Image: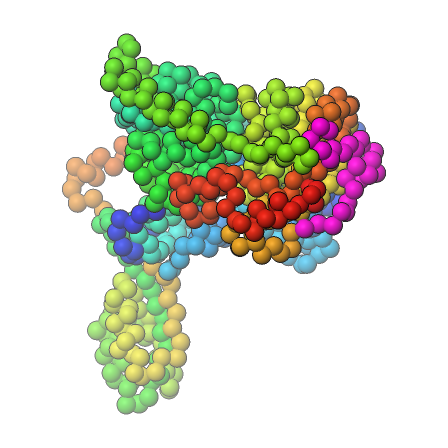
């Protein structure tokens, strides 16, 4: 049966199991919206800016494990989407983005709302397609979902010229996708796994360093089993948070630039470092020649190009984290005598004792204040009140780091943050996608006053679609992370960071039909959060915090992880902080 | 990243899907990752759905490892092989138009003859030569012609192919490798 290209697109989405599409209509995709008019089984959520559609798809994908889908028109819509695509690319989030395109005969003519969409998205997607023939629609969409969700996941972009959508075609639906040029490796090399197992069993000071790949491959249970079996402490990257329960005695919390003292010390002193689904990002390693200098490094990753990219590894294992960990657990059991080698067990006890000492010496800490709200306190209370069970999304900046440090995650797929690209404005639209996928869960968007306004228009989307995102703005009256760097590294020469009192976030929330709440002193924090979490629908809580609070520990960019700054070193900042009477 | 050996030129053969946009994916990868392409040539293979690129790139072993891995990561790339340390033949074609003043005409023809270059165009004031060879040979020809005054020069960039197996035994082993396609016309192996 013939049907319009637009209808074919929708049929294909349904066959791929898509239930929600985040989108914004416009000229070139009008045929799809016309087909959507009486199409059953697809929920469309109308966003207010196209990047938000992309981020919402990311939130949906990260928390469900399915492919997120967004649909926008040509030209400016496609260019707006670019940030979300690059964000998903850097964080390996599977989304399929559809853009409209001018009719094929006009491509290259500088037509109205034309942009070279596939040219622009080529370097920020895992793969992209321009559909030039309606017969290819089915196969291309099928390939797009296949490529996005397999191997190292990532965004795939499909550009749809208007005439292809209007004309009628036979729906071609290949049952099986076989690409001769794309065959990811899922099973690790048995020889390498055996080598890794031998290293693990003999290690005296091992550390597991786990990242977003553990989340993508649903390997948390295997990770837990391996850590318990071998009694190896676990540190998580920003993208990996939730892969391992943070209240577990073996948890070292996050490592890296704003990681815990004990995580960075443990990695530095380790003799075997096992990286699982992590990519040795510069925010994790600090100065590479000083990173884990004594360690034999095992690296498990599905992307061969991640291996030995930044750090040379000794035992590379290319494969799906879950399958490799399963095989590694078996191999470790084979290597391990009934109770483990006694000398290794003794060494392990000493190692864990050493780590416990680091934990006791420099836990994550901040100074309490009776008048000024400390942002870390807000995060602690959010963690307490939600018992570590909420879906947490963040913007980018200081609040993001505090959320990562103080929220005690218990489960995977409950944390969305822009790790690689550091996209300010990521919080609200992503939380929206999470809320659309999980209407029964509490979705908390921890945001900054700088970050939030970059996509605050999406409060309208939240309101109209009853997406009950609870936004907690850690309001420090400016770009806090920049303030911190200017304070510490640029000798207190503060420039272009302070905001005036605009906007009034409570009124802004109310203008969008949402509930707005403000907290100005510590005693108001818990009541405000409780009210936010118990009020139905989207809520914004404006928490005025101490603007001179910095994120510590901090490894200065380009420094070694052992050069952590644990407290504010800058006299000028301390002085200003002492003088400040309010949060502003 | 620690450097094992110093940078040197590598010749990399890449089999790709013969689809629009593939060249720009490959070229884009090099610019995005900060690698320098010395030359790139591309053409169809026996199978019209597959193109073969020969890329010359300079880098130490870690850069080259990343280049080959990143190339392989492109969805449209079927196979990547670094020919540098394997036995292979490299050739490049050059067209060169040189001033041909009466006092130089004999010498240019003699030089062309020595280098097995063909004269493909003659005018009263110029010769255009076609020369093929490896890089040192073409460089030498250019240096010899430079004093006459080179008007214009164009080179194709290198193409390279692995030499055939030296013994029958090795030849017999070859078909055991897993091919990328059942189609005997498709060149390339999955391993």
Q: Where is residue A132 in the image (x, y as percent from the top left)?
A: 61, 45
Residue at the (37%, 86%) spot, across then down: B125
Residue closest to the far bottom:
B103
The front one of B148 and B2 is: B2
Q: Position of residue A95 (x, y in %)?
A: 59, 35
Quadrant location of the C terminus of chain A?
top right
**Residue A63 magenta-highlighted:** no
The front one of A303 and A38 is: A303
Residue closest to the far top:
A338
Residue at the (68%, 51%) spot, across then down: A498
Q: Where is residue B87 in the image (x, y as percent from the top left)?
A: 22, 50
Q: How many labels does the image show?
A: 0
Quadrant location of the N terminus of chain A?
top right
In the rendered image, the vertical position of residue A321 relative to residue A127, given as above or below? above
Q: Position of residue A135 (x, y in %)?
A: 61, 38
The front one of A40 and A470 is: A470
Tell me the quarter of the picture where residue B157 sits. bottom left
Residue at the (43%, 37%) spot, across then down: A279
Q: In this view, does A245 lie to the left or right of A41?
A: left
The front one of A456 and A126 is: A456
Q: Is residue A427 left or right of residue A358?
A: right
The range drawn in magenta is A498-524
Let me know if residue A154 appears in the view.
no
Q: Which colour scheme is used?
A: rainbow
Q: Is residue A543 left or right of residue A278?
A: right
Residue at the (60%, 27%) spot, across then down: A380
Q: Is residue A69 left or right of residue B55?
A: right
In the rendered image, the vertical position of residue A412 relative to residue A73, given as above or below? above
Let me know if residue B151 appears in the view.
yes
Tell me the quarter of the picture where residue A194 sits. top left
**Residue A515 magenta-highlighted:** yes
């Amino acid at each position: 049966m013939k049907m319009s290209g637009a209808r074919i697109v929708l049929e294909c989405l349904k066959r791929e199991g898509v239930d929600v599409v985040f989108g914004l209509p416009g000229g070139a995709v009008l045929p799809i919206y016309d087909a959507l008019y009486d199409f059953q089984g697809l929920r469309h959520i109308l966003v207010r800016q196209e990047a938000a559609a992309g981020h919402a798809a990311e939130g949906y994908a990260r928390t469900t494990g399915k492919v997120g889908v967004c649909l926008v028109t040509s030209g400016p819509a496609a260019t707006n989407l670019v940030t979300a695509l690059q964000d998903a690319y850097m964080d390996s989030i599977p989304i399929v983005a559809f853009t409209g395109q001018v009719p094929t005969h006009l491509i290259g003519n500088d037509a109205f709302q034309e942009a070279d969409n596939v040219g622009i998205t080529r370097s920020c997607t895992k793969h992209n397609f321009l559909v030039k023939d309606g017969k290819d629609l089915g196969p291309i969409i099928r390939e797009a979902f296949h490529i996005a969700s397999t191997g190292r996941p990532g965004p795939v972009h499909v550009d749809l010229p208007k005439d292809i959508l209007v004309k009628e075609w036979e729906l071609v639906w290949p049952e099986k996708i076989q690409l001769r040029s794309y065959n990811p490796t899922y099973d690790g090399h048995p020889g390498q796994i055996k080598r890794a197992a031998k290293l693990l069993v003999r290690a005296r000071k091992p550390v597991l360093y786990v990242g977003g790949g553990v989340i993508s491959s649903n390997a948390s249970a295997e990770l837990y089993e391996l850590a318990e079996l071998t009694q190896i402490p676990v540190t998580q990257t920003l993208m990996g948070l939730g892969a391992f329960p943070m209240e577990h005695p073996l948890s070292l919390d996050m490592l890296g630039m704003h990681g815990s003292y004990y995580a960075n010390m443990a990695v530095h002193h380790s003799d075997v470092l096992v990286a699982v689904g992590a990519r040795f990002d510069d925010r994790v390693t600090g100065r590479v020649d000083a990173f884990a200098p004594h360690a034999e490094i095992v690296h498990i990753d599905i992307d061969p190009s991640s291996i030995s990219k930044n750090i040379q590894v000794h035992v590379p294992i290319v494969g799906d984290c879950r399958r490799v960990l399963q095989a590694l657990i078996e191999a470790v059991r084979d290597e391990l005598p009934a109770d483990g080698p006694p000398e290794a067990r003794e060494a392990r006890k000493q190692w864990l004792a050493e780590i416990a000492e680091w934990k006791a010496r420099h836990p994550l800490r901040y100074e309490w204040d009776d008048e000024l709200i400390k942002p870390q306190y807000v995060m602690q209370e959010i963690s307490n009140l939600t018992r570590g069970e909420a879906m947490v999304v963040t913007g980018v900046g200081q609040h993001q780091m505090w959320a990562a440090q103080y929220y005690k995650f218990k489960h995977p797929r409950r944390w969305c943050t822009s790790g690689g690209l550091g996209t300010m404005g990521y919080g609200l639209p992503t939380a929206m996608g999470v809320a659309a996928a999980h209407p029964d869960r509490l979705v908390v968007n921890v945001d900054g006053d700088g970050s939030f306004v970059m996509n605050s228009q999406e409060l309208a989307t939240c309101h109209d679609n009853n997406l009950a995102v609870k936004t907690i703005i850690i309001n420090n009256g400016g770009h806090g992370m920049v303030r911190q760097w200017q304070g510490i590294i640029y000798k207190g020469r503060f420039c272009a960071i302070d905001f005036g009192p605009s906007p009034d976030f409570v009124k802004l929330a109310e203008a969008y039909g949402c509930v707005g709440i403000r907290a100005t002193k510590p005693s108001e924090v818990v009541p405000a959060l409780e009210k936010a979490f118990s009020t139905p629908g989207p809520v914004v809580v404006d928490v005025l915090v101490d603007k001179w609070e910095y994120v510590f520990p901090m490894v200065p960019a380009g420094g070694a992880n052992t050069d952590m700054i644990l407290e504010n070193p800058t006299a000028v900042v301390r002085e200003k902080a002492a003088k400040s009477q309010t949060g502003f | 990243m620690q450097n094992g050996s110093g940078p040197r030129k590598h010749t990399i053969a890449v089999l790709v899907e013969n689809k629009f946009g593939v060249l720009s994916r490959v070229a884009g990868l090099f610019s995005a990752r900060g690698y320098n392409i010395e030359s790139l040539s591309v053409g169809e293979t026996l199978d019209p759905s597959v193109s073969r690129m020969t890329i010359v790139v300079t880098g130490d072993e870690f850069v080259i490892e990343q280049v080959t891995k990143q190339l392989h990561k492109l969805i449209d790339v079927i196979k990547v092989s670094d020919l540098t340390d394997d036995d292979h033949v490299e050739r490049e074609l050059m067209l060169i138009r040189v001033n041909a003043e009466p006092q130089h005409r004999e010498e240019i023809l003699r030089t062309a003859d020595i280098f097995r270059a063909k004269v493909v165009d003659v005018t009263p004031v110029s010769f255009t030569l076609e020369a093929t060879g490896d890089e040192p040979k073409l460089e030498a020809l250019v240096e010899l012609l430079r004093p006459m005054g080179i008007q214009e020069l164009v080179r194709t960039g290198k193409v390279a192919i692995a030499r055939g197996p030296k013994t029958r035994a090795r030849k017999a082993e070859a078909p055991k490798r897993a091919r990328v396609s059942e189609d005997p016309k498709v060149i390339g192996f999955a391993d």
